[in-house]
Image (spheres, rainbow, N blue to C red):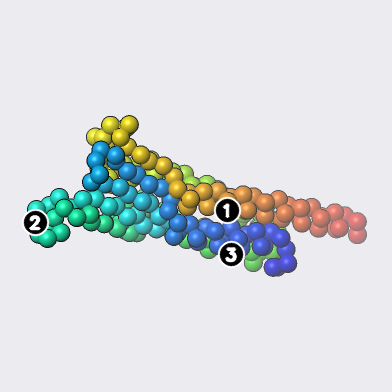
Amino acid sequence: MIQRLQSLLLLVAALANFAALLLPYGYADTQDAMDSPSARLYGGYAVISALNDDPAAGENFGEFAQTTLTVGDDALLTIHALLIGLNGIALIGMIFLYNNRPRQMRLVYVGLLMLMAQIALAAAMIWTSMPKWVGAENVDPSNFDLGPMSGFFVPLVSVLLVWFAAKRIEKDERMVRDMDRLR
């Protein structure tokens, strides 16, 4: 099981996918002034920083305040965190299907599709939800900075690792069929 290269590739892909929960996926900043809001998206939560301009805040008036959106606060964020967790668990589960290669192969391809859905959902959150979180719907696009960060690329590494594992599983299946034919 562990001596097979595809098992190691699936394990590393699962660990990388779980690490994506903690890495920053994207950022959004309005550059109108020093006190403009900004947001950072992580795998399972988002942090929004903005100047506290509410006079009722008392002594905290004029200071930066941070708001954290967690799973349950935003629908896309919840779906994204669930996809990360399900993908990681599914990748680990695929390792233990080593004695049923055709089923393992089908599940690996389903896992690839789920990883691509995870990447697409992260991109959708970066380019649609994050501008709303910082109130940038009415901001001139030249004064708005938005983009992916390191965590956005970790699922891409997982996709590559899972794809390499799929190729190794296919190679094993071909080898077993060739051995059966020689008997």
| Foreground: disc 3 or disc 1 | 1
Counting labels gives 3
Task: Tell me which label, 2 or 3, sits earlier in the chain.
Answer: 2
Horizontal and vertical percent position of residue 24: 42, 53
The kind of residue on which mark 3 rests is Gly
SS at badge 2: helix
| Foreground: disc 1 or disc 2 | 2
Can residue 99 be seen?
Answer: no
SS at badge 1: helix
Q: Residue at x 29, y 58 (%)?
A: 68
Contact flag, marks 1 and 2 (Cβ < 8 Å): no
Q: Which residue is mark 2?
A: 56
Q: CA distance from mark 1 to mark 2?
A: 47 Å
**Given the current orientation, which residue lies at the most extreme front position?**
34
The kind of residue on which mark 1 rests is Ser
Q: Which residue is mark 3?
A: 93
Q: Residue at x 16, y 53 (%)?
A: 62
Crowdedness of circle 3 by 10 Å Cα count: few (<14), some, many (20+)?
some
Can residue 52 be seen?
Answer: yes
